[in-house]
């Protein structure tokens, strides 16, 4: 089993390997953030928008009036690798903790959305009848509405907190998972082995978990990657609009927003967290792309 | 086997029902919410008298269905109520902003649609060539980029490094068209990049699945010239999926405009919506949210209708 996986990985195209490396790096940073980061999450370590390792202008009269990186970091125990943010906190530290908060919340949301979407989708496929009709019409209504606008309207009523964000995004996203899992379960549900299990008197829960789920796994796993990307981008967009995670929690989307003012001074601080978001999404997309081609031969035309 | 007007009518009804259902959900949500909305908006320091007055103003002392029906009736007749934040008429607040948003979305669409369809078709017809691979790679990365990342890269390049365009797009109604276009250049460019990537990818997929269909293969095997296959066999059938792709992406554009407006501090409806959400100015959020959603629903409806018109087979669903 493990050997097969390793072999598949070794034979993967370079794009999939690159994607995997990106994911592994992100997960490592996320898990070991407190160990790896040189400063505490919210400690102010210096001036506003100090330059990072790219600082090269030592003269005080220079364009950005920055001193060399070594000069900046002369009195510090650790150097500020990527400079400081709008409150003088170490950007690298914030980036690590941001990985922790953003990725874990996106992950929890995606898992919740899959739990809801798959159970409703499988229920609709096995029970059919009014359950299927009711759920499907409800999903039709939600999907006819633009997700971002819907989320904004709900958030204005219930206010922003981590729990609310997770539940709202998970429910909105579960509609897409529902569509897919219902469709794949419909195909599996008519198979003889499901019929046999049904006649054997197995309960609906067993049917869903032991008969349908294992046989619908590949498309669902691929979809998990795609939905994660979507949730992650969506969460970042909400944070960027100031409606996601609230300060002082570090989060990539809000880091972009908070430092946005720097850009007109020619300071590229907000690009760093934005690039982090983009890189992780590309990584996941590359792996999903490879997985889809490999596992099911699905969507080869993309 | 419905006739076309009946089908269109059905979908139109579904669209309206959707909008009503969502606004109803929001109304019920306000009711079911634990705690007091008026208190939550005013904050802990508000006196009970202020809260009571505010509740009356919001209509929170009435049962939710009365409140909802009054609101819906007013909304239908064009009276959207007044903003909680600055007591101004919402219709007056929204008026010029809606125009600005449509101006931005339209100027992006005019460039994006032909460009994307052309590039997508080229990528499909010259499949597996270097050109196709380049396009696939660019679209994959652009789709992974959040809109604000694209926007800030453009600001860095075109506004900070080379001062070509302004990084803040301020437009006023009395500006001449040229000045207006100059002001919206960067936000429009951002939208174009994002939408073109999506549209190209979808066009390419649609054309490729079309070119693999049996009748195209048959035509090819009969030895018909490639140009004739494309014009006589592929084009009439490609019309429906491509129109679909275009309209769906226009719908996407309408929503994507929200983030881009915030980046460029553009005085549009999206900016108003986001501001009102953070101020919890419910009447404004509801009005502008429903305008966005209504446009989105309408565009999706148009996509359905146009693809049915272009492809008569869809009139007889299996």
Image (tube, coloured by chain):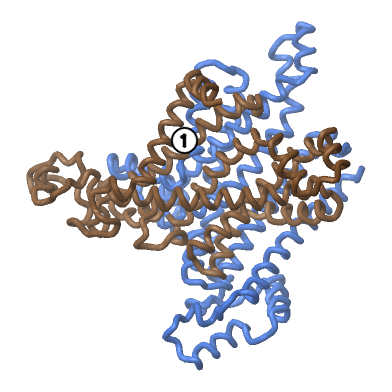
Q: Colour of chain A?
A: brown
Q: Residue at x 54, y 81 (%)?
A: B38
Q: Quadrant of residue A190?
A: top right
- Given the current orientation, which residue lies at the most extreme front position? A200
Residue at x 61% of width, y 42% of height: B249
Left or right of residue B122: residue A254 = left
Q: Is residue A153 above or below residue A78?
A: below
The residue that mark 1 highlights is A282
Quadrant in the picture for the C terminus of chain A: top right
Quarter of the image for residue B21 reads: bottom right
* Vertical arrangement, residue B237 with respect to residue A240, above or below: above
Residue nearest the observer in this picture, A178 or A140 = A178
Check the image and report above or below for B284 versus B106: below
Disc 1 chain ID: A
How many other residues sit within 10 Å of disc 1, few (<14), some (14-19) or many (≥20)?
many
Q: Quadrant of the N terminus of chain A?
A: top right
């Amino acid at each position: 089993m493990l050997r097969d996986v390793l072999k598949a990985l070794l034979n993967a195209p370079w794009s999939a390997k690159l994607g995997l490396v990106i994911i592994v790096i992100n997960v490592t940073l996320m898990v070991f953030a407190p160990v790896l980061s040189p400063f505490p999450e919210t400690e102010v370590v210096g001036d506003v928008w100090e330059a990072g390792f790219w600082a090269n202008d030592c003269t005080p009269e220079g364009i950005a009036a920055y001193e060399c990186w070594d000069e900046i970091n002369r009195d510090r125990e650790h150097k500020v690798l990527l400079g400081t943010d709008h409150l003088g906190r170490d950007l690298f530290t914030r980036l690590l903790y941001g990985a922790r908060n953003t990725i874990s919340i996106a992950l929890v949301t995606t898992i919740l959305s899959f739990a809801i979407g798959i159970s409703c989708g499988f229920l609709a496929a096995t029970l059919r009848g009014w359950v299927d009709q009711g759920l499907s019409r409800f999903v039709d209504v939600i999907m006819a509405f633009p997700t971002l606008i819907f989320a904004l309207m709900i958030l204005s009523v219930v206010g922003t907190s981590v729990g609310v964000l997770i539940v709202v995004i998970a429910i909105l996203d579960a509609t897409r998972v529902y569509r897919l899992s219902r469709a794949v379960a419909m195909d599996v549900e008519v198979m003889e082995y499901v019929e046999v299990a049904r006649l054997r008197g197995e309960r609906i829960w067993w049917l869903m978990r032991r008969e349908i789920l294992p046989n619908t796994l590949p498309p669902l796993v691929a979809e998990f990657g795609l939905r994660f990307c979507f949730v992650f981008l969506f969460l970042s967009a909400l944070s960027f609009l100031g409606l996601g995670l609230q300060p002082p929690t570090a989060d990539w989307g809000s880091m972009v927003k908070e430092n946005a003012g720097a850009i007109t001074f020619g300071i590229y601080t907000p690009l760093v967290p934005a690039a982090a978001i983009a890189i992780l999404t590309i990584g996941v997309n590359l792996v999903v792309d490879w997985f889809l081609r490999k596992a099911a031969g699905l969507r080869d035309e993309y | 086997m419905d006739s076309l007007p009946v089908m269109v009518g059905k979908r139109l009804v579904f669209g309206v029902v959707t909008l009503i259902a969502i606004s109803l959900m929001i109304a019920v949500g306000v009711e079911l919410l634990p705690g007091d909305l008026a208190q939550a908006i005013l904050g802990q320091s508000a006196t009970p008298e202020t809260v009571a007055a505010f509740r009356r103003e919001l209509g929170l002392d009435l049962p939710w269905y009365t409140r909802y029906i009054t609101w819906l009736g007013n909304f239908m007749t064009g009276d959207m109520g007044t903003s909680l934040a600055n007591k101004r008429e919402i219709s007056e607040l929204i008026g010029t902003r809606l125009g600005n948003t449509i101006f931005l979305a339209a100027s992006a669409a005019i460039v994006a649609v032909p460009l994307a369809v052309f590039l997508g078709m080229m990528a499909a017809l010259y499949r597996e060539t270097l050109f196709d691979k380049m396009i696939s790679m660019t679209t994959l990365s652009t789709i992974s980029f959040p809109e604000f990342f694209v926007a800030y890269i453009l600001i860095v390049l075109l506004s900070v490094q080379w001062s070509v365009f302004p990084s803040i797009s301020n437009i006023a109604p009395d500006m001449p068209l040229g000045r207006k276009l100059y002001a919206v250049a960067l936000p429009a460019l951002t939208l174009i990049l994002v939408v073109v990537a999506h549209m190209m990818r979808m066009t390419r997929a649609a054309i490729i699945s079309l070119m693999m269909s049996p009748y195209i293969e048959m035509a090819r095997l009969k030895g018909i010239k490639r140009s004739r296959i494309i014009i006589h066999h592929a084009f009439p059938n490609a019309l429906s999926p491509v129109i679909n792709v275009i309209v769906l992406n226009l719908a996407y554009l309408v929503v994507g405009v929200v983030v881009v407006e915030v980046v460029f501090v553009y005085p549009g409806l999206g900016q108003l919506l986001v501001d009102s959400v953070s101020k919890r100015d419910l009447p404004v959020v509801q009005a502008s949210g429903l305008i966005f959603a209504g446009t989105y629903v309408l565009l999706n409806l148009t996509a359905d209708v146009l693809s049915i018109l272009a492809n008569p087979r869809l009139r007889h669903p299996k």
